[in-house]
Image: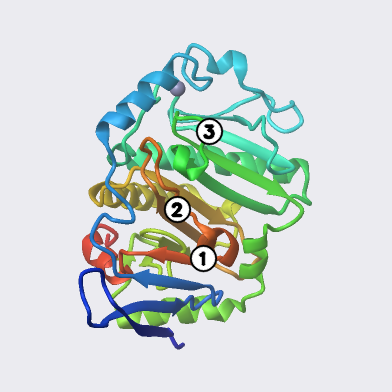
Amino acid sequence: MELRREVLEAEIVYPGSERPAPTSVEVRWDPLTAHTARLVGSPPGALFPPADPGVLATLAEESRASCPFCPERIEQVTPRFPPAIWPQGRIRRGRALLFPNLLTYGQYASVSVYGPDLHALRLGEFTPELVGDNLAAQVAFVRAVLRHDPAATWASLNANHLVPSGGSLFHPHLQGTAGPFPTTFQRLLADIPAERFADYLATERRIGARHLGATGRAEWLAAFAPAGPAELRALVPEVAAPAELDDELLAELGRGISAALGLYAELGFESFNLAIYGQPPGHPLLLRMLCRQNPRPFYRSDVMYLERLHWEAAVDLTPEDLAEQAGDRFRS
Ligand SMILES: [Zn+2]
């Protein structure tokens, strides 16, 4: 498998200078989808300034008084599943609590909090148990939906964390969806021959510079052509759909995601998106997660014309530097 990258060079005359000086940008092609990414050299922190603890504390405090996911309101203001799907109405696993999403992004859509009493969590505070239990609640949801409606085979588990990621509620949570059609990206992935995923893993394992290790049955990578800041991927070759995740794999993904969020915290990020894509039988389950701009007053969105309309991210942290920073945290 070829991992294609090209460095494009030109010249500009900088202010205060009379002589042309070189500029460069690196373009990379994703080995799975051929999506391109741009690695730009910018002064550290110029594109993505680090999180401001004061802003986070203010957001936590201001949202708490009316938060629908906090213990004093959650039972009254969140919906329940009908008995045909889940007789108890809401799904509990450990401290996690799952209920239907009022915003029906999917035919079947869920929201699950890590805990009603966990209104504010810094990324370094998502323990393996909190993440594993929340994923387990989502897996119980997709299994219940499948028993109720066998046509709802396309499922995904997702996260928006903090406003820059699209999360409208501050209280940390996951979202699940299931229905009869793939999303655009699930369709793109489903069209890739299954062998290509194995080839991708084998290639990255051989090169080593972006292969972060295996936590057990899941292998973690820094994305070669990231779709956003610090994109990480996990592939689980043994399963294709979230409904197939057993207790051991849920605990393992809980450890992996917890480690990834700890890495993001170390890098100065506090907002992220995550997707675990259900795929057709024979394909590996794929997890992708990336950082978003930190919340700050009048912030610059990290999604500009390139990301939104050209489907191509501009990032200033190289995947190899990300892997270096990750160290051994994904090696069990
Ligand atoms: Zn809350």
SS of the residue under disc 3:
loop
Q: Is residue 17 above or below residue 115?
A: below
Which residue bears the numbered disc 3?
A: 168
- Which marked residue is nearer to the observer: mark 2 or mark 3? 3
Q: Earlier in the sequence, mark 2 or mark 3?
A: 3
- Amino acid carrying label 3: it is Ser
* Observer able to see residue 328: no
Which residue bears the numbered disc 2?
A: 249
The image position of residue 195, as x and y in percent, is: 56, 81
Point 34% across, 39% down: residue:
126
Query: Left or right: where does residue 309 sit relative to residue 235?
Result: right
Q: Quadrant for the C terminus, please.
A: bottom left
Q: Is residue 148 above or below residue 207?
A: above
The dot on residue 207 is: none
The dot on residue 238 is: 1
Q: Earlier in the sequence, mark 2 or mark 1?
A: 1
